[in-house]
Amino acid sequence: MQRNGPIALAFHILVVTFVLAPLVIICLVAFTPENTLTLPTTGISLRWFKAVFAHPDFVTSFWNSIWLATISATLSVALAVPAALAISRYSFPGRDFLNALFLSPLIIPHLVLGVAFLRLFALIGVGGSFAWLVATHIIVVTPYVLRLVLAALSGLDRSAEQAARTLGAGEWTTFRRITAPMILPGITGGWLLAFINSFDELTMSIFVTSPATVTLPVRMYMYATESIDPMMAAVSALMIALTAVAMLVLDRTFGLDRILVGQR
Amino acid sequence: MIRRSPFTFAPWLLAGPGALFFFGLVILPLCLTVILSFHAYDHSKGIQDTFTLSHYAAVVTDEYYLSIFLRTLRISALTTLICAAIGVPEAYILSRMRDPWRSVFLLVIIGPLLVSVVVRAFGWSMLLGSQGILNQALHLLGLPSAKILYTETAIVIALVHVMLPFMVIPVWTALQKLDPMVEAAAWTLGASRFTALRRIVMPQVSLGVLSGSLIVFGLSASAFAVPALLGGRRLKMAATLVYDEYLQELNWPLGAAIAIIVLVANLCIMLAYNRMIEVRARRTLG
Amino acid sequence: MAFLNLEQVSKDFGPVTAVCNVSLGIEKGEFVSLLGPSGCGKTTTLQMIAGLVEPSGGRISLDGRDITYEKPNRRGLGVVFQSYALFPHMTVAENVAFGLEMRRVPRSERNERVREALSLVQLASFADRYPRQLSGGQRQRVAIARALVISPPVLLLDEPLSNLDAKLREEMQFELRRIQRKVGTTTIMVTHDQAEALSISDRVVVMEAGRMTQVDAPYRLYEQPSNAFISSFVGKTNLLAGKWRRNGASAYVEIKGISLEAPIADLSDAAPVMLSIRPEKILLREPGAGRLDGRVTNRFFLGSQWLFTIETVAGTMTVAIPNQGGDPPLEGSAVGLDWTLTNLRVIPDTANL
């Protein structure tokens, strides 16, 4: 309607600066040729990026995180889509409870989930295996997928499905040919959101990873508490670059604001 | 369009596997943790099979733990307040921008949500450290250096940075639902810009502000990475305390008790929020 | 000078000119409609009067006072928005009272005026409801009451009836006119519905592509449209393209090899023109008894009237005949078409110059 005044714009610039400052600093410091965390004033160097790729712990953790995020995002889609169909399409006793159960990891602090998994794994003696780490990540990311798929299903025009049925399609054919393509954006958006959340997860993972399954955020956390050198900045800059690329892809394909604003 | 007809196994076949999985990995571990928090603990012999309330008693009587809880509350409240003070006007400014600026800046503000918290906390530690950019700038201006890193101020600054999107998103969503002509209608009826904001816009986004505040408060109170990286060894919050009890002191039952307190506090906030929304909905729907 | 005066008012949005040199004087107590298709600049014009859009050029004055750049909250005009823009978190009474509150009217007087305004729009018993509990027509009337309660010198209505269903729209047209007559407020209404504009306005302003093209009483607008666009936009008409010929004291128009007698017009010989004749002005005769022969290709029964499409040498014509109870010509039958010469309009065909 009406434009923002000069005071509003000044405020806006301050907020944007505040939001971007730590990210910009990281990306600058990552290029320093010095041994300490300084802005690259004497020249620009890639030595710390080379150091990251030569550091076996970071490389291993990176691949751990990629596999972990890929597998848990995929399995959580496999779990959330049928669950969303059951919740949105049927009325059955315990429906509200099921919905609450699937969404509960959103309101349980990750810290609490972490210690709870730790206790469970200690009791059944499976601590530290990759498969169980995947299981914990599925718990954490499934709510995001479920919410996007539920939103896609509720926004669906049911008459298109009814039209398919009147044209002779069976229930499964209708799902495969009509429903699934229509909720595909929700599913894909949910998968990507699950991937990113799993890839970034720290607080819970710190309790359930073993030396062999350390994820990248946990590795970075441990590194940051022990030593402070520009390698940390280089890893962080790589993470920021990766996230920026993911954001760009997400935005081009689905509209990032839609997916993020749907998230809470 | 919900099927009510005869009993069908279909929903159970569809949701059953997931439900079992969630039951085994959410409800069961939480119950185990509650039980664990009542187990006695001996420093030389570890977890005992006897039950006791002593961990909860210790937490609510020991000044050390109380001070950590108080600090957690203080920091979370301050973070929430600052997030609201920054996030609400920013969401309003964003909503009045034109495309493409609107979508670009919306992404700038909420995009960092996708960047790992460790990265963002590390960024702030570089900005605020004793040799950090802020102090270098102060030095250049001939001002004395400020000790910010490893203080509550550092934690609050970084938490605000991490939590800001969680405030902007619900307020933005509420603003999107607003008919832009409603504000114009107030102007034509004689309201000044400020009165229209206060009387017409604010009441309609207050639910968004409330929901944002509760999310920010809940997440801040259980935040781990920011206090761990910016608070240092001595400045603990609830989450770092639990971490230390579990992984340093190895006193799991005490850690479990603290974790349960954090969980219950979180659930209370969420329940209170739901109640508030229901009451509000009933009032406006009559 | 008129009560509300627009002089050479223009509005550009970047390179796009939304409104171009609109000049219009509106007298006290008048009900004027701005009529045009979407995107013709009528809503922008209204918003400039309301103060929600700043003009790029020109001058707007109210009762001799220049209000061109005055803030909307200082103008004191009543505005009814297309979406109604009711305050969803306030009751009906609170909505209506808002403008009085801004004017610091004491509470007792405020309550009294709110009650009066609500009974004017027949919603007295809905004072404590919230907007979402009302039907579309009721919300509309709350919006009118809210705009009228501050006794504005001018009431601005932006497509006030477009969100209502057909039957309700018709009722609200008369309701709107009743309220306006009773209160006597100068009113400007924006609409894209010609029937709406014709039925309730004292004068209609037709806008096309940001410009005013005709300002007239509804009756004259209908009978004497100034161009081909208006003649087909306002009501239905048959348009036949041809060449105008003068023949001494009379004139005729050549259409596809035949000639039809036409009224005298101030045109040069052989000028391209459009003949316009309204469907209800055509009479059906026996074949050969009219001015033009044709064959019925379709007939539709509309209850109060019959609608025919008739194929003639000059082109396809639509004819409306009142339903008198008899059985009119069947599809396929030959008929003659006749009309009074004064009902035939000759419009210079600017598109074919």
Image: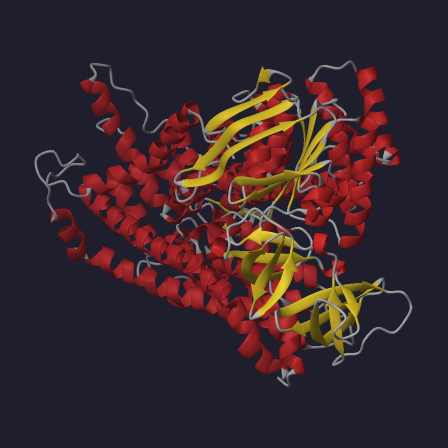
Is residue C73 positioned above or below B286 on the image?
above
Whether residue C95 is visible here, answered yes or no, is no
The quarter of the rendered structure image containing the C terminus of chain B is top right
Q: Position of residue A92 (x, y in %)?
A: 73, 68
The N terminus of chain B sits in image quarter: bottom right
Q: Position of residue B280 (x, y in %)?
A: 72, 38
Could you tell whether A66 is left or right of B267 in the image?
A: left
In-image side of A83 versus A214 (left or right): right
* Residue at image location 89% in from the left, 65% down from the top: C324
Asked whether C192 or A240 is in front, the reply is C192
Among the 4 quarters of the image, the one containing residue B108: top left
Q: Is residue C336 left or right of residue B129?
A: right
- Against B38, is A143 above or below? below
State how many labels appear: 0
What colouring style does the render use?
secondary structure
Going by the picture, which residue comes out furthest to the front? C248
Q: Nearer the viewer, residue B65 or B197?
A: B197
Q: Position of residue C158 (x, y in %)?
A: 65, 39
**Which residue occupies the foreground of this view, C29 or B202?**
C29
Residue A106 seen in the figure: yes
Of residue A193 and residue C194, the one placed in the foreground of this image is C194
Q: Quadrant of residue A167?
A: bottom right
Q: What residue is drawn where x is 53% and y is 36%?
A: B217
**Which residue is the extreme one toward the left?**
A42
Q: Where does residue A121 sit, x and y in percent of width and height?
A: 47, 61
